[in-house]
């Protein structure tokens, strides 16, 4: 069992109590025993030798949250003054240390409940976003210099200051890794490890990042780690004059409201919210690869923001594509998260799934596969912890516009595939598809599978919805140095865009260093000009 204190001002600190994380294997075998054990331990009960506990983490109250913000505020001038190249070393060193311990890290993700295939994707995404190519890209975003005969000019990004980061419950560990470039940009960090899954976040920062900061000579308080309730933490950060940015992951309704509160308080909100990504398959696509890309919808049982949530397929290839997709999906079966083929996660709150399914079917959607609960063996079981991956066929873009399973984010294993009406004109049809994608209220990612350069060009040039567009590629896969996060609309709020943390937690500043010429000459640009001749 890992045992983590709070980490405030460079020291391990006691909290107001403890929260315990239970191995997922116990949750699958006996959920009542797991919940009962966790409650007993959280209330101060004694740990038994056979208890399958992953970690014990200290809990923070208002006093500890205040101390963490004060420590980060005190450290920010000294850390910001460290030369950029020295700070960027943090990313490279973190990359090498994580790579050295990648098996341990992946095993921890699996123990937290991430299916092995998803855990592998997550681990590689962090390595990709912290590799040498990414660091070079970050450097170019932070400093740009221009030499002229009269001046040395620079556009630099300066750190905002104290950043409060609260990653999401469903993928806390992986998303918390955005804090590494946030620190490298010169900010100090207060990181909240979620109560439900604090282990991986503490592991990354207490065991990897904190020692590296010490090696780099970072002042105490540069990094602070707390485990605390979301509402309590956010309330403190919003009300605190010491917190400059709040980096929030969560649902769109709550996130937009938090963003509004932040702006009113003079705090910068950085919002990573829900997603409802579309994946388009055109008539000339590689259908085998397109079908496999669509199956990414079921990674983690769809409980991941960055997976495709609906498809649109050209009517000329719809039947063939859907048959290939159905065959691929029916091979995806429940298993324990440590299994090599593990793909699905349990879905405990499944009421919304059946409500969306019923509405879709009543509106005319066809269930091609799935549509029921199942047990760990994949057998139909109305009390099962899993939901069979479900594919729906929805005919007509206009019809699809009124189907909630298409227009709203779903957070369960359901993939509606829309087959538009065929107007007999591909240009007109693709315009309709782009209009449909452009009307999406969310905007994390959109994907296209096509070979026609003209179609690819239109997709890339005309579609502005989404923080990332991908063509003939994995929808969820990381493509460093492009940002893995960020979106428009309900995915990122009114200021939403592709989110590079070193940019979103800094502000642009221009610098001009002149040669010392006469300021009037410099300011007004006076020159000897010929007298104006009369007309």
Image (cartoon, rainbow, N blue to C red):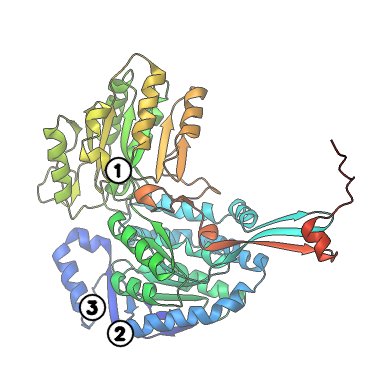
Q: Residue at x 28, y 56 (%)?
A: 253
Of the numbered discs 3 and 2, the one sitting upstream in the chain is 2
Looking at the image, which residue is at 33% across and 37% down?
295
Q: On the image, numbered disc 2 is attached to which residue? A: 16
How many other residues sit within 10 Å of disc 3, few (<14), some (14-19) or many (≥20)? some
Q: To which residue does mark 3 refer?
A: 42
The mark lying in front, picked from 1 and 2, is 2
- Relative vertical location of residue 307 with respect to residue 458 in this rendering, above or below: below
Residue at figure coordinates x 34%, y 47% from the top left: 275
- 179 on left or right of 218: left
Disc 1 vs disc 2: Cβ atoms closer than 8 Å?
Answer: no
User: Residue 479, position in %: x, y?
Assistant: 51, 45
Q: CA distance from mark 3 to mark 2?
A: 11 Å
Secondary element under disc 2, as helix, strand or loop, is loop
Q: Residue 95 at x, y = what percent?
A: 55, 60
Q: Earlier in the sequence, mark 1 or mark 2?
A: 2
In the image, what residue occupies the spot 49% across and 34% down? 460
Residue bearing mark 1:
298
Image height check: is 273 above or below 247? above
């Amino acid at each position: 069992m890992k045992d983590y204190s709070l980490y405030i001002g460079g020291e391990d600190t006691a909290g107001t109590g403890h929260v315990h994380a239970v191995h997922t294997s116990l949750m699958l075998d006996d959920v009542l025993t797991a919940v009962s054990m966790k409650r007993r331990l959280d209330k101060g009960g004694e740990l038994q030798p056979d208890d399958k506990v992953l970690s014990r983490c200290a809990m923070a109250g208002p006093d500890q949250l205040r101390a963490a913000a004060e420590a980060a505020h005190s450290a920010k001038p000294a850390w910001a003054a460290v030369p950029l190249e020295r700070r960027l070393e943090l990313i490279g060193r973190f990359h090498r240390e994580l790579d050295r311990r990648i098996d341990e890290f992946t095993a921890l993700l699996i123990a937290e409940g991430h299916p092995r295939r998803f855990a592998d994707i997550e681990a590689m995404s962090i390595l990709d976003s912290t590799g040498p190519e990414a660091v070079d890209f970050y450097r170019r975003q932070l400093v740009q210099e221009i030499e002229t005969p009269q001046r040395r000019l620079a556009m630099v990004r300066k750190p905002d200051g104290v950043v409060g980061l609260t990653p999401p419950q469903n993928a806390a560990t992986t998303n918390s890794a955005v804090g590494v470039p946030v620190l490298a940009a010169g900010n100090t960090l207060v990181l909240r490890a979620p109560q439900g899954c604090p282990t991986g976040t503490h592991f990354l920062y207490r065991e990897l990042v904190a020692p590296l900061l010490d090696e780099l000579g970072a002042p105490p308080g540069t990094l602070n780690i707390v485990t605390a309730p979301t509402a309590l933490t956010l309330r403190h950060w919003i009300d605190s004059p010491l917190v400059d940015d709040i980096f929030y992951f969560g649902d769109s309704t709550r996130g937009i409201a938090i963003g509004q509160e932040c702006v009113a308080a003079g705090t910068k909100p950085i919002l990573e919210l829900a997603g409802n990504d579309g994946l388009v398959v055109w008539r000339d696509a590689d259908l085998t690869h397109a079908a496999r890309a669509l199956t990414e919808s079921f990674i983690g049982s769809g409980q991941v923001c960055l997976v495709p949530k609906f498809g649109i397929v050209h009517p000329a290839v719809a039947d063939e594509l859907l048959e290939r997709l159905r065959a691929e999906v029916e091979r995806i079966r429940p298993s324990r998260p440590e299994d090599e083929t593990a793909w699905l996660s349990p879905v405990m709150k499944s009421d919304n799934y059946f409500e969306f399914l019923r509405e879709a079917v009543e509106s005319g959607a066809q269930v091609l596969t799935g549509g029921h609960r199942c047990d760990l063996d994949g057998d139909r079981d109305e009390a099962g912890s899993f939901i069979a991956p479900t594919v729906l066929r929805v005919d007509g873009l206009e019809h699809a516009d009124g189907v909630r399973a298409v227009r709203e984010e779903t957070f369960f294993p359901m993939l509606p595939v829309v087959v538009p009406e065929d107007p007999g004109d591909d240009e007109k049809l693709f315009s309709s598809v782009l209009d449909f994608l452009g009307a999406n209220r969310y905007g994390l990612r959109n994907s296209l599978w096509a070979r026609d350069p003209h179609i690819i060009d239109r997709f890339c040039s005309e579609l502005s919805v989404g923080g990332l567009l991908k063509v003939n590629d994995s929808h969820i896969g990381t493509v460093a140095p492009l940002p893995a996060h960020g979106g428009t609309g309900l995915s990122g709020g009114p200021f939403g865009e592709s989110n590079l943390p070193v940019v979103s937690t800094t502000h642009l500043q221009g610098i001009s260093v002149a040669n010392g010429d006469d300021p009037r000459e410099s300011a007004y640009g006076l020159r000897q000009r010929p007298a104006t001749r009369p007309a």
